[in-house]
Image: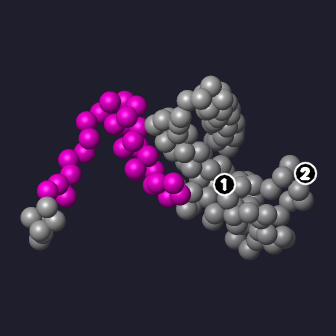
Amino acid sequence: MMRQRFTAAYTTTQIMKFMGLQTVARSMRGYSQGPESSLNKLLWSEHHHRFTELAIDVIGMDATAPSGRDAATGVGVDDVGSPFSSQAWVTTFIGARPGSIYSGSNEIQRNIVGERVLGLPKEPRADVGPWNETKRS
């Protein structure tokens, strides 16, 4: 099970790397960012959740009473070669949670991908028309 999770983490990281390179190449050619940026954000935030959960599982019981220095940031992992700190990983784990809300929640990003990338119909809106005619319970 752990081996599969490590493999999935590595694979997703490689996918994000190549998607990022593709985004940079498009920007360098003068193209603006389209709905694929929603796909990048969605993939990153879900990977960040899974990756930090994997790290906490590897740390084990030390994560219940973390020790050591705090993380440099609450969003990303520390630099390669930084001394191990269960406190830093717990801070990163907690900081990964709001990442699914930054720049639009994952649900909004899924709607953008569905409508603009996959061509699915828009969801029906309940707030169409004048506000004073909006149905209320």
Mark 2, residue position: 81
Amino acid type indicated by mark 2: Gly
At mark 2, the secondary structure is loop
The residue sitting at 55% across, 62% down in the picture is 98
Q: Is residue 90 visible?
A: no
Which residue is the site of mark 1? 52
Q: x, y (%) of residue 129?
A: 14, 56
**Residue 118 drawn at (x, y percent):** 37, 30
Decide if residue 43 is on the left or right side of residue 90.
left
Query: In the depicted view, which residue is nearer to us: 31 or 48?
Result: 31
- Identify the residue at image location x=46%, y=37%: 35
Foreground mark, 2 or 1, reads 2
Residue at 57% over, 61% down: 97
Where does the magenta region start and end? 101-129
Q: Label 1 amino acid?
A: Thr
Q: Quadrant of the C terminus?
A: bottom left
